[in-house]
Image (cartoon, helix red, strand yellow):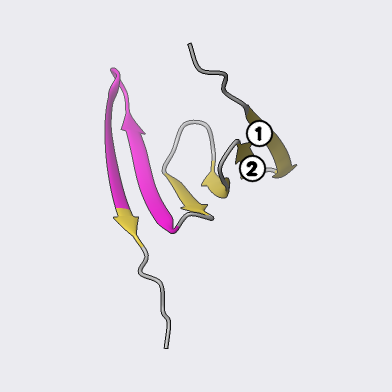
Amino acid sequence: MPITFRKSFRIFPGVRLNINRRSWSITTGFRNGPKYTRSSTGRDTFSANLPGGLGWRSTRTRRNREG
């Protein structure tokens, strides 16, 4: 079984810093509403939860601009 690490810190109300073994991310949003997460690995995620256990999530990967 692999060992995992994950820690989340509340920076301001509605803003969290999430740290895991490979990356970090910033999440904005509140407990019962839409959330936006931007990761250091280039992933942007928008999620919204609905009453009754239903939810929606969209993930997009940012491209590196080298040049």
Q: Is residue 65 above or below residue 25?
A: below
Whether label 1 touches label 2, CB < 8 Å: yes
Residue at 55% in and 48% down: 28
- Label number found at residue 34: none
Q: Is residue 5 magenta?
A: no
Per the model, the C-alpha gap separating discs 1 and 2 is: 7 Å
Q: Is residue 53 magenta?
A: yes
Front in this rendered view, residue 33 or 27: 27
Residue identifier under label 2: 16
Res. 50 image quadrant? top left
- Label number found at residue 8: 1
The quarter in which the C terminus is drawn is bottom left
What percent of the width, then of the height, locates residue 19? 63, 39
What kind of residue is marked 2? Arg
Q: Categorize mark 1 by other alpha carbons within 10 Å: few (<14), some (14-19), many (20+).
A: some
Identify the magenta region.
42-59
